[in-house]
Amino acid sequence: LITDTISSKSIILNLLAIGLLLEADNAVAVLFLSNHYDVMMDDAVREVDGGASGAARKTFFWTRVQGLLCTVTLVGAMNRIVQFVKYCDSLEYFLFQIILWPALIMFIGQVLYSIIC
């Protein structure tokens, strides 16, 4: 993915590959999990917005924020890796930085949010 040129053909093929993996995941879930788990997950999803307590809403909010931060960090790192990493020796430092700073930001953000709210 990193060395390929960006073209409509590669984007479509990557989207098809992701779609295939998601469908395979659903098929495996249907084969190996009983109907009980499907009902349990439907109940959990239905109760998230309606009857969730304040603590559950905060947890759900921070899960979304962390997922968004991970996505932005991954896309940003892939776009900038060629500019920052010239030699393999600096790859370890680069990877350490893209793990350390988002984790530190999330930790400080959660502490401040728990103090304020």
Image (cartoon, rainbow, N blue to C red):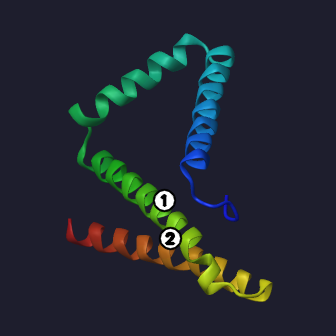
User: Nearer the viewer's eye, disc 1 or disc 2?
Assistant: 2
Residue occupying the point 53% across, 20% down: 37
Lower sequence index among marks 1 and 2: 1
Mark 1 highlights which residue?
A: 71
Mark 2 highlights which residue?
A: 76
What is the number of the mark on residue 103? none
Q: CA distance from mark 1 to mark 2?
A: 8 Å
Residue at the top extreme?
35
Mark 1 is surrounded, within 10 Å at the Cα level, by few (under 14), some (14 to 19) or many (20 or more) other residues, namely few
**Residue 67, percent from left and from top:** 45, 55
* SS at circle 2: helix
- Dot 2 amino acid type: Gly
Residue occupying the point 54% across, 64% down: 74
Quadrant of the image for the N terminus?
bottom right
Residue at the right extreme?
88
* SS at circle 1: helix
Is 50 on the left or on the right of 74, as rendered? left
